[in-house]
Image (spheres, coloured by chain):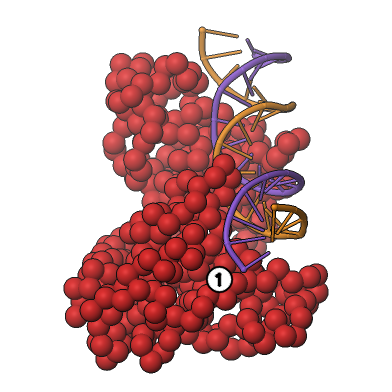
Chain colours: A red, B orange, C purple
DNA sequence: AGTGGTCAAAAGAGAACCTA
DNA sequence: TAGGTTCTCTTTTGACCACT
């Protein structure tokens, strides 16, 4: 059985801007996540008249929909599910959809609307002007058809999707915990990279590794296919040391010339964007050939006989995470210069201790690999279930 | 000619009312 | 109350200059 969205929700409640103040919580699109849950880490407080608060206060089980926002790559119409205690309203860029609980299970409706956004249905209801994108909410509510099985079935479907979400979140959580574990092992074994509490030898990075950048490749030398050519942004995204889908390429001949002249990044070398206050350092783990833009990507040719590349990755990550702005310089923005990188005082513990650390990290990396696999599987499962629920097949 | 450093334009992202 | 714009801050990157 199908029904129109308008028949199973109350009249949408529009948001309120309010005035400067600190009386009630106001949820904005910043508080939306792409996974359909609210992010309450940055909720603003505003003043709103008492009668408005009474009329528009969010209730548990409400669905908040984004009316204005999105981007060229992301359609407008995201939804989040509200199940908080306390007084919350939402702002003008959003509206509240309140399910009629005798007809529809709120969680079920939420998942369906989430799928609508995910699978591009909201795109048919958006009004694109020059700037931001607006959702034609009235049309959406009046025209949108919803598969509506009996309440009991809806509840079961919502439960299945909840379980799939929980599984996915648990795996995600596991991945962050592995990262934290790796970080805490580093700090426990070596201490703060600036303080050097264990008084190990310090050497200039330049004395133990090759430090520099790539040879310049000019825009007109880039081609449509060939060897991947990465810019700083992409290097920063290559967090697991494996290639992402490239946009730019150089010819194989060009690559061979560069290989001859400067060498090319090898397994165990480190790359980092020069603008990198959060310590995104890439340890290369692929043999697939690629090259990268000079100047914005710094290249550390690790000499493993002097220093272990896993150890150095974590040393620099910790150092930059806490001290980037002391080391980087620049007028418009802080940027790590090659000279500054060369001069970094690198703590060099005995190599066997570094290797012990690397062994532990490799184990963690293996576990992470497994967790990543699981995450992919649980995401596929969730998507598959969502797809089915959306088509009314999950009955 | 090859590198490194700097500058600032361009692009992107996010937040905030106002008006018809 | 629906629906459109602009500002500002951040990030990315091309261009250029200076030095070797």
Instruction: Using the image, name the chain to which the residue with label 1 belongs.
Output: A
Foreground residue among A106 and B5: A106
A214 left or right of A86 in image: left
Q: Quadrant of residue A111?
A: bottom left
Tell me: residue A196, above or below residue A73. below
Q: How many numbered discs, if any?
A: 1
Q: Position of residue A316 (x, y in %)?
A: 56, 50
Tell me: residue A38, above or below residue A372. below
The residue identified by callout 1 is A95
Q: Residue at x 64, y 84 (%)?
A: A55
Would residue A207 be visible to someone looking at this image? no
Q: Around disc 1, counting alpha carbons within 10 Å, would you say few (fewer than 14), some (14 to 19), or many (20 or more)? A: many
Q: Position of residue A189 (x, y in %)?
A: 52, 65
Q: Residue at x 52, y 27 (%)?
A: A294
Q: Judging from the image, what secondary structure is the residue with disc 1 in?
A: strand
Q: Quadrant of residue A391?
A: bottom left
Q: Quadrant of residue A151?
A: bottom left
Would residue A249 be visible to someone looking at this image? yes
Picture quarter with the C terminus of chain A: bottom left
A353 left or right of A93 in image: left
A315 left or right of A223 in image: right
Tell me: residue A373, above or below residue A55. above
Picture quarter with the N terminus of chain A: bottom left
Q: Residue at x 70, y 68 (%)?
A: A17
A7 left or right of A187 in image: left
């Amino acid at each position: 059985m199908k029904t129109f969205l308008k028949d199973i929700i109350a009249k949408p409640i529009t948001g309120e801007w309010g005035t400067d103040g600190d009386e009630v919580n106001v949820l904005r699109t910043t508080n939306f996540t792409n996974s359909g849950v609210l992010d309450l880490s940055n909720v603003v407080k505003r003043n709103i008249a008492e009668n408005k608060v009474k009329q528009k206060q969010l209730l548990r089980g409400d669905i908040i929909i984004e009316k204005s926002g999105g981007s060229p790559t992301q359609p407008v119409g995201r939804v989040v599910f509200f199940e908080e205690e306390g007084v919350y309203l939402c702002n003008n860029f959003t509206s509240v959809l309140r399910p009629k609980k005798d007809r529809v299970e709120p969680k079920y409706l939420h998942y369906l609307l989430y799928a609508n956004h995910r699978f591009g249905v909201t795109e048919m209801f958006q009004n694109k002007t020059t700037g931001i994108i607006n959702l034609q909410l009235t049309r959406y509510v009046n025209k949108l058809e919803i598969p509506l099985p009996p309440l009991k079935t809806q509840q079961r479907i919502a439960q299945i999707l909840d379980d799939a979400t929980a599984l996915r979140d648990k795996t995600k959580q596991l991945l962050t915990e592995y990262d934290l574990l790796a970080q805490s092992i580093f700090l426990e074994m070596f201490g703060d990279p600036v303080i050097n509490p264990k008084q190990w030898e310090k050497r200039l990075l330049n004395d133990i590794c090759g430090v520099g950048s790539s040879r310049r490749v000019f825009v007109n030398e880039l081609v449509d296919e060939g060897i991947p050519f990465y810019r700083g942004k992409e290097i920063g995204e290559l967090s697991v040391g494996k290639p992402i889908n490239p946009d730019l390429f150089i010819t194989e001949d060009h690559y061979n010339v560069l290989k001859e002249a400067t060498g090319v990044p090898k397994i165990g070398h480190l790359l980092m964007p020069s603008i990198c206050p959060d310590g995104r350092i890439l340890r290369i783990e692929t043999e697939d050939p690629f090259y990268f833009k000079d100047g914005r990507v710094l290249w550390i040719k690790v000499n493993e006989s002097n220093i272990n590349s896993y150890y150095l990755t974590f040393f620099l990550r910790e150092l930059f995470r806490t001290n980037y702005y002391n080391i980087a310089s620049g007028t418009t923005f802080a940027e790590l210069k090659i000279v500054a990188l060369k001069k970094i005082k690198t703590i060099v513990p005995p190599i066997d201790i570094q290797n012990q650390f690397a062994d532990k990290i490799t184990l963690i990396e293996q576990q992470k690999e497994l967790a990543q696999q699981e995450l992919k599987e649980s995401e596929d499962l969730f998507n598959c279930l969502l797809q089915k629920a959306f088509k009314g097949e999950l009955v």
